[in-house]
Image (tube, rainbow, N blue to C red):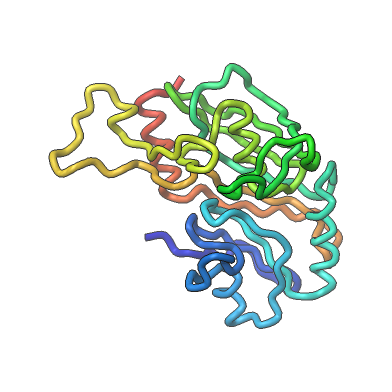
Amino acid sequence: MAEPLQIIHEDGDLLAVSKAAGVPAIPERYDRQMLSAFEMLKENRPGLLVVHRIDKETSGLLVFCKTENALRHLGAQFAGGDGNRFLRKDYLAILEGRPLWNEAGEESPLLPDADRRHRTIVSPDGKKSVTRFTVLERFRGHCFVQACPATGRTHQIRAHAARLGHPVLCDSLYGSGRPLFLSAIKRRYKPPAEGEKPLLARLALHAAALEFIHPASGRSLRLEAPLPKDLRAALAQLRKTGGA
């Protein structure tokens, strides 16, 4: 099992970690028993401050602040996501289907927590939301993309990917939610008699990089979290069985 947290960067102002899928960024509203990344880290860093979050199901980069000054500066960069030139967020995802486009900009306004399933929906009452998708690789029934959100709405990438007709793989809220099985992508593959385990059963979305102005140095800082083992393994099988 992967470690729940890996430290990517730490200095006197910031702490950046790569969290595993399934670990909440902050304490869960509906499950207080599940330990969050913030709670794990603040045991040894009592002054730690939350500046942003990523979905529990999403793996990857999460940044915390150690001082109020750092929180003000970095928080302003996250809050100013509408075209903020000082903050760049790069995600990597496996999507369902093979899009005809190489690049797509999705700008549908989004309204969070808008239905009984607490989904973010496209709505004229929603806030401006901008995501740029770039296809990195195509496979027989899937694609590997980079997604760069210029705004920071809840579930933004997931809702915009679904809006384009290519939801994130294994997304039960915005897509089919079906796990990825080798038998579904490899021709003439016979599953073992005892049953087939999925290649991937969690949301195929990873917060890969953040670039921002460091609150103390005033210089640009880019942090990267490598793809976790489960996503690398799923991609390796997709390349073997249906790269194009």
Q: Is residue 113 left or right of residue 96?
A: right
Query: Which residue appears at 81% of the width and 48% of the height?
Result: 81
Residue placed at 52% from the left, 43% from the top?
Answer: 173
Seen in the picture, residue 33 relative to 180 is either above or below; the reply is below
Where's residue 98, x and y in %? 51, 22
Residue lying furthest left: 193
- Of residue 190 and residue 45, the one placed in the foreground of this image is 190
Give left or right: position of 140 versus 101: left
Residue 96 at x, y percent in the picture: 49, 30
169 or 118: nearer the viewer: 118
| Residue at (45% x, 40% y) in the render | 170
133 vs 219: above or below? above
Percent x, y for residue 186? 30, 26
Residue at x 22% of width, y 22% of height: 188
Q: Position of residue 222 (x, y in %)?
A: 71, 52
Q: Nearer the viewer, residue 200 or 163?
A: 163
Q: Give the number of marks.
A: 0
Placement of the N terminus among the 4 image quadrants: bottom left
Q: Residue furthest top?
A: 100
